[in-house]
Amino acid sequence: MRRASDFDRIAPHLALWHAYDPGVKAELYSTGLTSSGGTYLIDPVPLRREALAELVGYSCVAGVIVASSNHHRASVQIAEQFSAPLFARSETFLARRRTDSQRFTPILSKSSERLHALLNSNL
């Protein structure tokens, strides 16, 4: 998949970007949600380095969220790059490499209360 070259800032705390994936013949979309605790990247497709730096800005990447089993995209790589936690449902990484599945925090666990609080405060 090619890296997305830019993103669209929809609101001060919300950004979207997308890239075409010829493997699935579809345009894949990603979301950045910024709060006082940092930026959460949801189902991130690769984004060019300059655009990713602009998206995150002076904030930190507080977490990478994988919403579905087929939305791995660049989630593991971005989580590693920013030393950020990877949030997903427990079954999301079952078919993936063992090392990928060891890196995520199950969304339904107590350790993801921070994520639940963020999502509830922005809805």
Image (cartoon, helix red, strand yellow):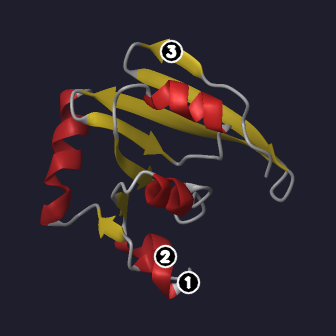
Q: Earlier in the sequence, mark 2 or mark 3?
A: 3
Tell me the tag on residue 97: 1
Q: Position of residue 19 (x, y in %)?
A: 74, 39
| Side of 62 relative to 96 (left or right) | left
In-front residue for pair 60/118: 60
Rendered view: 48 above or below 70: above
What residue is pinned by disc 2?
Answer: 100
Q: Secondary structure at mark 3?
A: strand
Which quadrant of the view contains residue 84? Answer: bottom left
What residue is pinned by disc 3?
Answer: 10
* Label 3 environment density (alpha carbons within 10 Å; few <14, some 14–19, many ≥20): few
Identify the residue at image location x=46%, y=33%: 32
Asked whether the beta carbons under mark 2 and mark 3 sit within 8 Å of each other, the answer is no
| Side of 39 relative to 26 (left or right) | left
Disc 1 residue type? Arg
In-front residue for pair 6/112: 6
Identify the residue at image location x=16%, y=41%: 117
Q: Secondary structure at mark 1?
A: loop
Of marks 2 and 3, the one in the foreground: 2
